[in-house]
Image (cartoon, coloured by chain):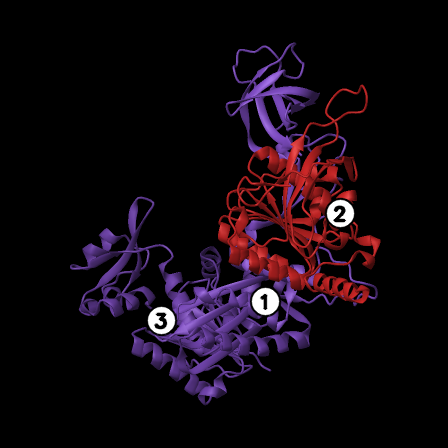
Chain colours: A purple, B red
Amino acid sequence: MQKRFISIWFQHLLADWQLIRRPELAEIPFVYATPSHGQILITAANRLAISFGIEIGMRAADAKAICPGLEVLDDKPGRPKNLLKGLGEWCVRYSPTVSIDEFGLDGLLLDVSGCAHLWGGEREYLKEIVRRFKSKGYNVRLAIADTPGAAWAVSRFGKVTPLIPSGEHVDALLSLSPEALRLEETVLAKLRKLGFYQIKSFIGMPRSVLRRRFGENFLLRLAQAIGTETEVLVPLKIPVVFSERLACLEPIKTKTGIEIAIQKMLENLCKRMQLEGMGLRTGILTGHRIDGKTIQVSIGTSSASHSITHLFKLFQLKIDQIRPTLGIELFVLDAPNVEDVRIPQGEMWCPRPGLNDNTVIRFLDRVAGKVGAQAIHRFIPASRYWPECSLEKTASLTEKASAPWRTDKPRPTELLKFPAPIEVMALIPDHPPKFFIYKGVRHLVSKADGPERIEREWWLDHGEHRDYYQVEDEDGSRYWLFRSGHYGGEQRHKWFMHGFFA
Amino acid sequence: MDTKKDILYKLKQDILLWQGFKHQSSGQADCIGLGEMENLFPGGVFPKRAIHEFINIQPEHLAASYGFIAGLLSLLMENGAACVWVSTSRHLFPASLSLFNVEAERIIFMDVQREKDVLWITEEALKCEGLVAVVSELNDVSLVESRRLQLAVETSGVTGFILRKDGNKKASTVATARWKVSPLPSVNEEGLPGVGFPRWQVELLKIRNGNPGSFILEWAGEKFKEAKKINNHEIWSDLGGRQIG
């Protein structure tokens, strides 16, 4: 099918927007200005101000001199883009693919292939859009053509008709000035200097000549306008493939009602995903309330799933967070993130339970939905000696350890988060202590092993090494103590308790 | 008379089976490696479909309980199964589990903020048939909550271990077994210096349909070893400080 594009140009975007907000400005010339390089420059002006001879880029002081009674308003960077985004989202009613014109930041580009007949032909379609914008208060110029570049050019510089029939866009371009091609100012200046006032005067020239004079970008813009190079429009809203809508006759207020709605949408969604062999990774349920607000809950799974019962259970955990207030009239269930479902091979022998067991994964999804995925982790051995660093936290179920667990050195079953200082009496330096006082209780040591010296990772942190002793007191409790650094320093607390053995 | 006795015996065995206890004749594979101690359990088999409660007051006892549970997990997790460890304040050092033949990477740790979440996760985990055991560090379980956990266990067959810090509220749960593990001085072979194998006084304070008892056990490198028999069955009762013979 022949592609068709519409370019919408907002002639006075900021001024129109300001007039809608403050209608009393209609009779007053006003401009937007922003400080730049130590002077205040005009960024936008209304029709009245332009009629006085004020131009964009002029100094505000000069403008005030030309036009007495000029109102200067502060401009905020990024405002046109925000405005265009809002207008673009509204334009989704005309076409699913709406993108902001990034070159001038004063218009929209719509991919309207196959849309126009819904409004009774292209002429009616254009009229409808202009009328709606006009009734809102925006002055727009439109053009429809086979390429976004041609539509852009005609909307801004076209003098004959905004409706360029299919296949005639090149002819329409011929009589336009080079500015219509979306070129940089330096290239335009060069073209003017060489006497090219119309596109037709250089369109037939050999490419190599044009490239040498005006650069690669010039050729690209030309090709985009003619249509030999496709221009990709980035849509404002990327359509979600797997999405379900459920409109309700009566607003839904109860938990049971919401549950039925979720169940119904999941049935359709899962059936579609099953046919395509896909599974849901993230799901977003949006409820449009009758007071105009929307509420959202989202779920995530750790492996793709299209099981209705499982996904329903995940949503069930979130229902409490939905505040229906007066009622929800429209439910939308989106699956923005889907993946291929891994269908497990049927086990011939008795199933071996393990980490990738289906029921375990579903259980983990439920826990992640309830308390958050950050609570769930596994530990794999790290090849480091320092006790606090000898483990590596991992959130994935499949990550394998690079090294096996060490079994050659004793490690306590209970490790204190921070070593606790203790008082110690040792007979000879480098001997295990004779007794130690931990939390005010005196423990007499009867058996001891050690020392096991563990050096700090000097390339990462500085400090003393540790000499670890495994000691057993007279009651049979086993402790892991260490002395920080060499014996005989000035520091008082050099001994620490770091854990309890089984 | 004999027939009546037989019928009664048969009936008892059936009741045990319904309650989730397996009979010894169902196979030696169910041996958990506790040696003589297993005779205390109903039918002589460690009850896997059950909640085991451990009372720990001091951190030394907690460390000993960790060790004992790790020893039990090594047999439960033998076939590559996964285990869940839920806690609000976990002190377990996973690197030590390798000394008890447990592959710590097959344990899924869940560290949450609230006690309520621990309880919820414990119940959900106990319902999950793909797991083999759930270790839960709970301070406070009410009768109703423990009953719910027990019901979850009976349908799924997951073994539940609950580590409780508060010893005073011990009478109010319906756990199948209640344990107390306290460390004992290790004993070395003749003339060897240093600390020997970890040795514990393992007290089975309460066991449904079984006999409470107390044993001295040692983790001898790769399995439990009974150190010596204690003849006087001095048992710490559920009801206050009362001693029962």
Most extreme residue toward the bottom is A120
Disc 2 is attached to a residue of which chain?
B
Q: Mark 1 points at which residue?
A: A205
Q: Is residue B84 above or below residue A245?
A: above
Q: Which residue position holds label 3?
A: A325
The three-letter code of the residue at mark 2 reads Glu
Discs 3/1, front: 3
Asked whether residue A170 appears in the rendered view, the answer is no
Q: How far apart are marks 3 and 1 (CA)?
A: 67 Å
SS at circle 2: helix
Q: Which amino acid type corresponds to the residue marked 1 in the rendered image?
A: Met
Of residue A384 and residue A313, the one placed in the foreground of this image is A313
The amino acid pointed to by label 3 is Thr
Residue B147 image offset from top left, x and y in percent: 56, 59
Q: What is the x, y in percent for residue B240?
A: 53, 42
| Residue marked by disc 2 | B38
Determine whether the residue tagged by mark 1 lies in a helix, strand or loop.
loop
Quarter holding the N terminus of chain A is bottom right
Picture coordinates of residue A180, whole percent (x, y): 46, 68
Please provide percent x and percent y for residue B101: 76, 41
Reply above or below: A399 against A319.
above
Asked which quadrant contains residue B91, the reply is: top right
- How many numbered discs? 3
Could you classify mark 3 by the number of other residues whose Cα lies within 10 Å: few (under 14), some (14-19), or many (20 or more)?
Answer: few
Q: Residue sitting at 60 percent across and 17 percent down? A: A435
Label 3: chain letter: A
Q: Residues within 10 Å of mark 1 (few under 14, many from 20)?
A: few
Q: Mark 1 lies on which chain?
A: A
Q: Quadrant of the C terminus of chain A?
A: top right
- Badge 3 or badge 1: first in the primary sequence: 1
- Discs 2 and 3 share one subunit: no
Relative to A154, is A216 above or below? Answer: above
